[in-house]
Amino acid sequence: MPPLTIVIANKNYSSWSLRGWLALEHVGVAYREVLIRLDRPDTSALIAEHSPSKRVPALRHDDVLVWDSLAICEHLAESFPDAHLWPDDRAARGCARAVSAEMHSGFAALRADMPMNVRSRFPGYGRTPASLRDIERVRALWSDCRTRFGQGGPYLFGRFSVADAMYAPVVFRFRTYDVSLDATQRAYLDAMLAHPGMQKWARASETEEWKVEYDEYPDVRA
């Protein structure tokens, strides 16, 4: 059995799962994936078998258990330094940590009003004054990171990093809800959608037959 096991939920909806999974996929080592379906009577109990918080994702690495997406990214960066999950440059690394933490702790309206639904398209839905403020902040962050630190590649800090993993669900959200972007932001979104890990996740989400009604039908949320 591979030394790493990641526990996630439905790929179509579970934004936090995507963050930890994408960082692990980028590392390029063998791992085992355990997927637990959301919105079922036994969901909480099954997750609790792997995660003391009863939330996903959770990562088991030999005798180490980590159960938070940003903590998983930090653990992977520490365990696999050759993957360069943080920028080498000190200023870029500080900024990458700040924007990652901001995503981890903020953007509540964007999460609530525009749930991640990878395979669906809901253009125009989810616009509220609060979600629009969150959208504007994300757009500003993307533009700033790309302008100041993105010269070495197509991602926020040039090379793929934890910051990209943290904003990956927003990339899918912006596509699902058809959020307007300028040229710099659109180029970043397109680069992320072309990332092999993102494409692998999207293909899997399209084959899932399970549906969570609240996240599947905008009229239910309304």
Image (spheres, rainbow, N blue to C red):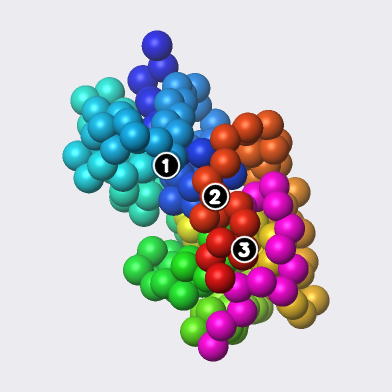
Q: Which residues are magenta?
A: 117-129
The answer to which of 78 and 125 lies nearer the viewer is: 125
Sequence order check, earlier mark of 1 and 3: 1
Instruction: Indicate whether 16 appears above or below 206.
Output: below
Judged from the image, the secondary structure of the residue bearing numbered disc 2 is helix
Q: Compute the Cα span from label 2 to label 1.
A: 9 Å
Q: Amino acid at mark 3?
A: Pro
Q: Which mark is residue 11?
A: none
Residue 118 visible in rendering: yes
Sequence order check, earlier mark of 2 and 1: 1
Q: Which residue is mark 1?
A: 39
Which image quarter holds the C terminus?
bottom right
Q: Compute the Cα span from label 2 to label 3.
A: 9 Å
Judged from the image, the secondary structure of the residue bearing numbered disc 3 is helix
Q: Say which residue appears at 56% left-offset and 83% top-offset.
A: 128
Q: Compute the Cα span from label 1 to label 3.
A: 17 Å
The answer to which of 171 and 30 lies nearer the viewer is: 171
Q: Which mark is residue 218?
A: 3
